[in-house]
Image (tube, coloured by chain):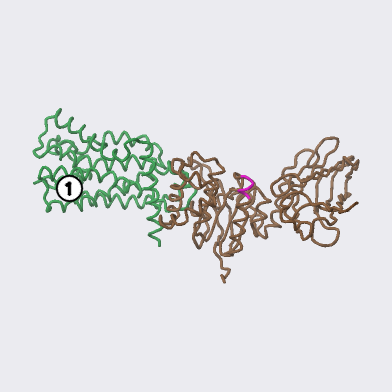
Amino acid sequence: MIVADTIIQVNHLTKTFKSNKNEDEVIALNDITFDLKRGDSLALIGPNGAGKSTLLKVLSQITKPSGGSVEVKGKVVSLLELGTGFHPELTGKENVYFYGGLNGYSKSFLTSIMNSIFEFSGVEEFQNFPVKNYSSGMYIRLAFATAYFLPFDILFLDEIMSVGDLQFRKMVVKSINDLRKRNDKTIISVSHNLTSLLNITDKAIWLNNGKIIDFGPSNAIINSYIQSAINKNVINNYSKISISKFGCKSLLNTSLSALSPAEIYFEMESDFLIENLSIRLVIRDEQDRVMTILNSELQDKYYSVRPNVITYVKCKLANLPFLSGNYSVDLTITHNQMEFYHAPCLYYFIIDNFSILSSEPLLKEGVLLIPKWDSSL
Amino acid sequence: MRSKQFFLPILAFFNRDLSIRFRASSIGYYWLLFNPLINTGLIYLVFGKLVNSTIQSDFLLYVLCGVIIWNFVANIVSECSALLLNNRDVINKVGFPKMALPFSKVLFACLEFLPTLIIIFIYSSFMDFISLKSLIILIPTIITLLIFSLGLALIISTVSIIYRDLVYVLPVLLRVGIFAVPIGYNLKDIDVKYKALIQYNPITGIMNGMRSAFITNYESEGLFYAFCFALFILVIGYITFKKSESYIIDKV
């Protein structure tokens, strides 16, 4: 059994960049302190320029901290900024040797894992072509496969899921979860695809302007990050309505499961009186595909808000006909086609399916229906 | 384990450069032979035929021994001037000891050094100049050359990031430099006013070492001085690189 020991320790880390003539200074990371244990999978989230990539660069010892200390125990392999420094003129195979060599692995060892890498990446036919002829998807597949098969202790992944196709994203999620099960690797992932992050991490750090806003279980941190991202984007009309206590619950006092009654609810508040508000909820799956849209306007149901009064909105559903997985909800509130509130991915919910109807092995995507079987002569 | 972490990246860069360099050329590795031969031919023509030379020994061998050293140093200077800039992709994405880059360039220069050395061996044994006793001097000569080049590689790759002008200045310096070393002329023929400039150039000492290994009765004058100078350059280079490493990485 592997003892859960501390493998990354960051103490009051700061990192500053100077402008070309050393006149201006930008603080990229400001007093970062956290530690990770072997087996942890961490998500780094935050808006662009929050310092996520810089933190990964400092941790992978590409750049040195300006202050504070960073201690990383173990072999680091990193996939930063959509790639690995593969050379475009070299073939796929040569690049694996190059990248492996840079990371301190011998040629004979790399030869021994070469087949596994190409098999896993799915670009076997192109192993002797220069990578400049690869598509960006093929490139990132090979890069990920190479990193994955190197015997690392710590893996850093920066935005790798934004390039590949759906199948690749699934492959990444599956392989990272395989690593997590082994419980001896530490993984840090940066992504703006929050649904995917939710699937592959158990802790999260929310960064903003180089500071840690929050550090904790990824579920809670990611959801509160989303809430704040919404509040920040508010402009004009948007600021007139605020939303709180958004959620989705089962009406049977159990966890959400398919085919049982459920309710999506939230509270609206405003300093103004606004009437005839229609509510639109878009439910999406992990791949961001729209599963369904619930629009109150189509059923002639309108809401209103008034000062100092909380308006409760409840949307009851007889059942959720979805397969098990993570789903996100977008909320839009409009008044006479004028948007008063819009929030993509306002909330996540997870459906655990133990329904006998979903145990059909060929049912991988689609919806669940409850048929009534009948016979007639 | 630590030395492996340093050596394998050097090898990785070396192999990468090797594959890229000869990929698109039709005569491939033969360029390693043609380059020094063309250089030698040119200098032989200019100094041997156009200028009246006072060199007593075999002039072709004299020039070859000069060219092999000059090529090595010139190689390092031109390859290292934009070394970190050209590799910014790798530097920014993979954590590896950055010093591996200048080291790999010195290793690569050795590869280009070998064919010429073999030509010199063949030529001098063919002409029956070779004597085992004088060959011993090759060892300190090559060590001095390596130390000097390594120091130069470290300094140039660092300083050219801080002062990017160097990328434009160095090719000019190289063009001037070829006349500031006694490749095709004899030190004795130089006007006394400028003699010191060439005499205290460590490359002169290394060239003399090279020549004394193959040319009978040739003195390895200034080799020890060159060795001390090279060590000094290496120390300066190491300190410069280590001191500015973290700063450079954010600059490339």
Compared with B223, B181 (above or below) is above
In this view, the residue in front, B149 or B135, is B135
Chain B on-screen colour: green
Specify whether B242 is left or right of A65.
left
Q: In percent of the image, x 71 and y 47: which residue is there?
A: A229
Hey, which residue is sitting farthest top in the picture?
B50
Q: In percent of the image, x 37 and y 34: which residue is there?
A: B168
Q: Whole-percent x and y of residue A303?
A: 89, 44
Chain ID for brown: A
Specify whether A266 is left or right of A120.
right
Hey, which residue is sitting farthest bottom in the picture?
A1
Q: Residue B33's quadrant in the figure?
A: top left
Would you name the residue on which mark 1 appears? B209
Q: Whole-percent x and y of residue B236?
A: 32, 50
Specify whether A304 is left or right of A177.
right
In this view, the residue in front, B46 or B192, is B46
Can you say which quadrant of the picture contains the N terminus of chain A?
Answer: bottom right
The amino acid pointed to by label 1 is: Gly
Specify whether A203 is left or right of A360.
left
- Which chain contains the residue that carries disc 1? B
- Reply yes or no: does residue A164 show up in magenta: no
Q: Residue B112's quadrant in the figure?
A: top left
User: Tag 1, which secondary structure?
Assistant: helix
Q: Whole-percent x and y of residue B92?
A: 49, 47
Compared with B177, A232 (above or below) is below
Q: Whole-percent x and y of residue B123?
A: 15, 42
* Magenta residue span: A165-169
Classed neighbour count for the residue bearing mark 1: other residues with Cα under 10 Å, few (<14), some (14–19), many (≥20)? many
